[in-house]
Image: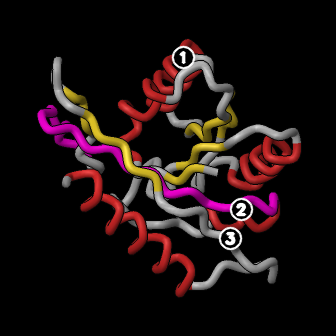
Amino acid sequence: MFALWHGEMLPLLYFHRAQGVSVLISEHGDGELIARVAMNYGYRTVRGSTSRGSARAILGLVRELEDGHDLAITPDGPRGPAKSFAPGTLIVAQRGRAPIVPVVAHADAAWRLKSWDRFMIPKPFARVTIAYGDPVRLDDDGRPDDARVDHLRQHMIALEEVARA
């Protein structure tokens, strides 16, 4: 199960295309655009978010794991705040008994949208670096706690420094 920041999804969608990864995409209007791009790149989609269809989304994601598919989730999406770690990612990992693999992307030249997540669009010929963290396994006690959420968030922030180097 990959955890990535919402603002870094574009280069990661491109890099992991045609690998059959399942992605969680918001049911909001802008989610439809992302869903179409993701499906054109060969992704499977599960629709929902913390504000709409969260229970259905969690069940759908766990089913994807049980069926042997990798997942990609933006723990800070679809509304932020940027680089926050909502507990839903941990719930899915625990119920699906899947490790969380943090992944970040950095472009040496990129446009940044004036959105809550500073959405990154790499410029032509930019060098994009993708960094993967060690898998994080969670205890199966049925509830995420603040310490785990903070640990994963800090792990991803540290990984950003690796990608920038």
Residue 12 is marked as: none
Amino acid, disc 3: Arg
**In magenta segment, residue 85:** no
Q: Which residues are magenta?
A: 96-115
Residue 137 is marked as: 3
Residue under circle 2?
93
Amino acid, disc 1: Tyr
Residue 17 lies, in percent from the top left, at: 53, 22
Q: Closest to the observer: 84 or 32? A: 84
Q: Quadrant of the C terminus?
A: bottom left
Specify which label sits upstream in the sequence, 2 or 3.
Answer: 2
Distance of mark 1 from mark 3, alpha carbons?
A: 29 Å
Residue under circle 1?
41
Q: Residue furthest top?
A: 40
Task: Name the residue located 33 percent from the left edge and 66 percent from the top edge.
Answer: 157
Amino acid, disc 2: Ala
Q: Residues within 10 Å of mark 3 (few under 14, many from 20)?
A: some
